Image: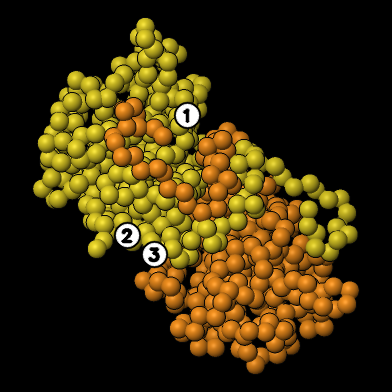
Chain colours: A yellow, B orange
Amino acid sequence: MTRQLTIGAAQLGPVNRSDERGAVVERLLALLHQGERRGVELVVFPELALTTFFPRWYVDDLTETDHFYETEMPNAATQPLFDEARRLGIGFALGFAERTLDSTGATTHRYNSQILVERDGSVVATYRKMHIPGHADHEPDRPFQHAERHYFEPGPDGFGVWHAFGGLVGMAICNDRRWPETYRVMGLQGVEVVLIGYTTPIHYVPDPSQDALAGFHNRLVMSSGAYQNGTWVVGVAKAGPEEGVELLGQSSIIAPSGEVVAQTLTTRDELITATCDLDWCARYKQTLFDFDRYRLPEHYTRITAQRGVIEPPRLTEPPSDPRGQQ
Amino acid sequence: MTRQLTIGAAQLGPVNRSDERGAVVERLLALLHQGERRGVELVVFPELALTTFFPRWYVDDLTETDHFYETEMPNAATQPLFDEARRLGIGFALGFAERTLDSTGATTHRYNSQILVERDGSVVATYRKMHIPGHADHEPDRPFQHAERHYFEPGPDGFGVWHAFGGLVGMAICNDRRWPETYRVMGLQGVEVVLIGYTTPIHYVPDPSQDALAGFHNRLVMSSGAYQNGTWVVGVAKAGPEEGVELLGQSSIIAPSGEVVAQTLTTRDELITATCDLDWCARYKQTLFDFDRYRLPEHYTRITAQRGVIEPPRLTEPPSDPRGQQ
């Protein structure tokens, strides 16, 4: 008996600044219904699915952007999605901007968040993005901003893994997926499927030589994270030309082998599905990547002991010890 | 002005059990001379280059295999390689089985080692493989053994990085390359080029579904390690049908972008070269993978605090906190 989970990656095309939440939720519902017709048990929506990717504009006063953030989830706009998903018995993950409030209604935190909801409508967890890319200050020479570090603080909770959907489920958001530590911290909790929403401008302003590699890098980091931890990875994009910025599509469902088993073809609203055998993970977790047998944490200390680079000392003389160990 | 280093990846075809060291060193010299004609400054030879991959056979008494190990480096058999490389002003990395001795001549340790020699003939360092794959006991049901854990103990020195060849050079061996920690520990020391010898049977006995993916996985782990740390990676195989076991070729030189810029086509002795711009690393190290700016070691603690998997507790009731954080 294998544990089969049919997952839908529900890519979204652009969401413009003028789009109302209600119109976006209609699109999410349409994808949910497509998922139902295709036997999907879990639908994964992208990062910041309910709004445009507003960190591409800079404002000095964050409160001017309060309307991009949700202060509760579900709320009036998203309740229809929660209700319909529960009615259909389909779980989902949904990315959104989150603004937490104190008892007086004042803003306490701003996070880039993703909620996971089980098939019975219960909330499993909310993950808050930790690796916030881009910049915090206005950089007027850019063709567009990527001021995520202005709009969001890093989530405080770490990378959790939860018993859900008959397996062990983890979450990450966009830039998190480029860091091998993300997958490894979840792999060390036995994760079997990692759900990742992303929004990736194809034009990388600090080094445009990377633009032509955007799809390659997206696949590379998710495939290696899958393989090296023996886990399924579901990466779901907000894609296409959003407010003049072309966003990468290539939403993918990736097996524990690192193989892409489903990928979107368009940069529009598009659902792809795969039936994921969660027991396939054991082929990697119990062989080549049997962590308990093969890992050497005593030699990994730099990974947690230091944040940035510390170069080795430069020897002025050739080492007297021929092994040259430092 | 950029720092250009022309590197040769000197793949070897099979080395049989009956092959004398001298005959192997002749092949290494032929590849070295090819490198000289192509302007190479650093030649990388494979893992256990001087002998057949003897862990494919099991013997109870390790001393019967003493002749596969070197007790000094250089030694009589390899001195011609060291001499000729120094004469040509070409550095090299060479993998070999190492047996250390105490003052009485008794064996103290057995390592799977790789020595790095500068263009002037000085020894930069010897790296001793840490992630030892396979098994320690005889497994008679296998078509061939992979008893590396019988023949080698893990190296004690960690992953070093050295100032050499005008840049920062690190080393790893074979199975080390599958572990993201390997590259990250070196990345945290600013590594700009990682030299990796490998010997990979295409048939993976514990899970043959991985056989058809051997080349994909080889490329996946080295490309992601390169990209995620902004470093060149040079992976060099012992390839082809060695003593009845088909070994993966696909030796590669990989850029900090993760792109393969040179790859062998055969499974025989074959030299591939690339002129590696070490300053290209900065395009990644100073942007997307600016560790000091973006890494979050406080959330990576599991990577060093635990060796194997610790699954999250299974909640019997849905979490009362709707965030479900644990």
Compared to B254, does B206 lie above or below? below
Q: Specify which label sits upstream in the sequence, 2 or 1.
A: 1
The residue that mark 1 highlights is A156
Q: Chain of mark 2?
A: A
**Measured from the top left, where is residue B270 in percent x and y?**
58, 78
Q: CA distance from mark 2 to mark 3?
A: 8 Å
Q: Is residue A218 visible?
A: yes
Residue A199 appears left or right of A77: right
Q: Nearer the viewer, mark 2 or mark 1?
A: 2
Residue A116 horizontal/vertical position (percent): 29, 36
Number of marks present in the image shown: 3
What amino acid is at disc 1? Pro
Q: Are marks 2 and 1 in contact (CB under 8 Å)?
A: no
Q: Are marks 2 and 1 on the same chain?
A: yes
Which residue is at 51% across, 45% downward? A181
Which mark, residue A279? 2
**How many angstroms separate mark 3 from mark 1 (CA)?**
33 Å
Of the numbered discs in the image, which one, if any, rests on residue B153? none
From the viewer's perspective, tell me whether residue A168 is left or right of residue A321: left
Q: Specify whether disc 2 shares its chain with disc 3.
A: yes
Q: Is residue A131 above or below residue B264?
A: above
Q: Chain of mark 1?
A: A
Residue B223 coordinates in the image, percent (x, y): 50, 57
Q: Neighbour class for label 3 at 10 Å: few (<14), some, many (≥20)?
A: some
